[in-house]
Each structure stands twice: as structure tokens, then as C-alpha cells.
Amino acid sequence: MMAWFQLAVSAGFIIIGILTLCVSVFGVFRFRYALNRMHSAAMGDSCGILFIIFGLMILNGFQFGTLKLALIILFFWLAGPVSAHMIAQMEVLTNEKLEEKCEVPENGDF
């Protein structure tokens, strides 16, 4: 009985993660500006990967592999925002028409 509950909960988390990633892909194709697309991609992959790997951790049970999955979540949560910020900063520095679409700081501070 407990194994079925574990399977159902982990499947729920995995399905939520897949749906989150699908909504993120829709946002990447739907939004017009690069910063909006980048935000959709960055938030979607962070949340989607969290739910999927958390579902895999529940499915795997308490083992050494669960610690490895937790470290993968930690890596994605540390690397994702940094790479998203670098992409946004590059967009602000290279797009001359960006000031027409959104507010850009004059002194270059981000």
C-alpha cells in the first residue's frame, strides 16, 4: 500500500514538473521581447526541474542516489539565476532599441 502511495505522489510531482516546463516553452515562444523570454525560460526550468527531481527523489526512496539528486537541484538553483542574469545583462548592453521597450538604468548598474 505504501509503495502505491509513493508512486502516486512521485508521479504527481513529475507531472507537475513536466507541465511547468511545457508552460515555460509556451512562454518562450509567445513573448515578444528577449528579456521576457529569458525570464520565462529561467523560472520555468528552475521550477520544472525542482518538481521532476523531487518526484524522482520520492520514487527512489532514501538512498545515496537521493543525495545526488538533491545536489543536482542545488546546482541548478545556483547556476540558473546566474546564467539568466548574465544573459539579461548582455541583452541590455548590446540592444540599442531596448530603451524604447523598457526602463534601462543610465549608470549601467544592474
Image: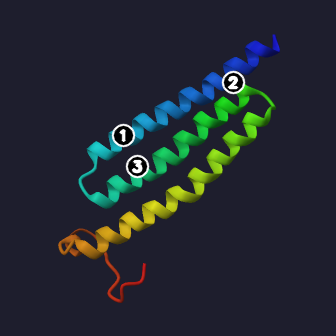
Q: Nearer the viewer, residue 109 or 73?
A: 73
Q: Residue at coordinates 28% horizontally, 58% vertically from top-left? A: 34
Residue 34 got which mark? none
72 left or right of 97? Answer: right
Vertical comparison of 14 with 3: above or below? below
Residue position marked by numbered label 2 in the rendering: 9
Residue position marked by numbered label 3 in the rendering: 41
Q: Nearer the viewer, residue 7 or 69?
A: 69
Q: Residue at coordinates 40% horizontally, 49% vertically from top-left? A: 41
Marks 3 and 2, Cα distance to the nearest angstrom? 26 Å
**Mark 1 element type:** helix
27 left or right of 73? Answer: left
Vertical comparison of 106 with 23: above or below? below
Q: Residue at coordinates 33% horizontally, 39% vertically from top-left? A: 26
Tell me the kind of residue under disc 2: Val
**Mark 3 element type:** helix
Residue 94: x percent and y percent?
24, 73
Vertical comparison of 34 with 40: above or below? below
The local crowd at label 2, few if under 14, some if 14 to 19, many if 20 or more residues have their Cα within 10 Å, is some
The local crowd at label 1, few if under 14, some if 14 to 19, many if 20 or more residues have their Cα within 10 Å, is some
Residue 8: x percent and y percent?
67, 18
Tell me the kind of residue under disc 3: Ala
41 left or right of 63? Answer: left
Residue position marked by numbered label 1 in the rendering: 25
**Mark 2 element type:** helix
Q: Residue at coordinates 75% horizontally, 41% vertically from top-left? A: 67
Residue 54: x percent and y percent?
66, 36
